[in-house]
């Protein structure tokens, strides 16, 4: 009886210690938690083709500009500012209608849109590689640049409701996971795992929606 009580007390102590450590960590990363929450909410609305993707996303990216600057993820800070600009543009585009039809419905990229998207990726990638290597103390030059460049392309296509945006998001999310893990941003790692899942789900959903509308 005494031995059983001691075992239960030890288990209780361990659980309380874990909860205490988590609460301490949460208090030190509450801004990251809020940013991650609104980021996931934004991608959820994006998957549903809901315009609320943009106001929720704006809250997330503004917070992440500050977080990324603090952790010396300069390219990610810059791309989050770009997200803010493209979120405003996307919000306007998604709300635009002509004769009760959306100006930018879900669609695939044509050749010119593919070229523009790839050009955005290459330009952003080269500029970030040069900037991070020569002008900052970043320790994740290549990873930070690839994440930011692919995300910039995704945002460019997303503003016009292009299905290819999901492929770019998937690439960005996969590369981002080890990057943020190394920086100790664990809430953000969880966020990007959810992002990856939602990006795959969003790709399937948008392709199905396009097929239904063009059957």
Image: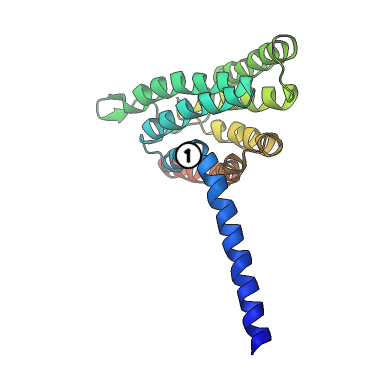
- 185 over 95 or under it: above or below: below
Camera-nearest residue between 56 and 51: 56
- 128 over 187 or under it: above or below: above
Q: Element under label 1?
A: helix
- Can you name the residue that lies furthest to the bottom here? 1
Q: Which residue does the numbered mark 1 point to in the structure image?
A: 43
Image quadrant for the N terminus? bottom right
Q: Position of residue 38 (x, y in %)?
A: 44, 38
Camera-nearest residue between 17 and 121: 17
Other-residue count near label 1 (Cα within 10 Å), few / some / many at <14 / 14–19 / ≥20:
many
- Can you name the residue that lies furthest to the front here? 2
Which quadrant of the structure image shows residue 181?
A: top right
Horizontal side of residue 150 vs 139, given as left or right:
left
Q: Position of residue 34 (x, y in %)?
A: 46, 39
Camera-nearest residue between 26 and 102: 26
Badge count:
1
Q: Position of residue 159 (x, y in %)?
A: 45, 25
Q: Is residue 215 visible?
A: no
Q: Is residue 168 visible?
A: yes
Image quadrant for the C terminus? top left
Report the residue at 46% width, 32% height from top.
60
Report the residue at 30% width, 30% height from top.
101
Report the residue at 66% width, 78% height from top.
7
- 95 over 78 or under it: above or below: below
- Can you name the residue that lies furthest to the left here? 99
- 144 over 170 or under it: above or below: above
Which quadrant of the structure image shows residue 183?
A: top right
Q: How is the image coloured?
A: rainbow
Which quadrant of the structure image shows residue 146?
A: top right
Report the residue at 45% width, 22% height from top.
84
């Amino acid at each position: 009886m005494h031995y059983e009580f001691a075992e239960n007390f030890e288990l209780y102590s361990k659980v309380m210690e874990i909860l205490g450590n988590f609460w301490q960590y949460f208090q030190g990363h509450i801004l990251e938690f809020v940013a991650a929450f609104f980021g996931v909410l934004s991608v959820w609305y994006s998957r549903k083709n809901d315009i609320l993707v943009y106001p929720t996303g704006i809250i997330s990216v503004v917070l992440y500009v500050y977080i990324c600057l603090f952790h010396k993820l300069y390219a990610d800070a810059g791309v989050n500012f770009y997200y803010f600009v493209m979120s405003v543009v996307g919000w306007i585009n998604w709300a635009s209608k002509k004769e009760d039809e959306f100006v930018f419905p879900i669609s695939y990229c044509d050749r010119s849109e593919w070229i523009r998207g790839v050009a955005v990726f290459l330009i952003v990638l080269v500029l970030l590689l040069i900037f991070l290597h020569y002008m900052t103390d970043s320790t994740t030059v290549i990873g930070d640049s690839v994440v930011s460049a692919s995300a910039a392309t995704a945002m460019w296509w997303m503003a016009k409701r292009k299905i290819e945006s999901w492929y770019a998001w998937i690439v960005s999310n996969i590369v981002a996971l080890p990057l943020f893990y190394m920086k100790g941003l664990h809430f953000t790692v969880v966020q990007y795992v959810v992002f990856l899942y939602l990006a795959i789900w969003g790709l399937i959903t948008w392709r199905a929606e396009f097929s239904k509308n063009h059957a």
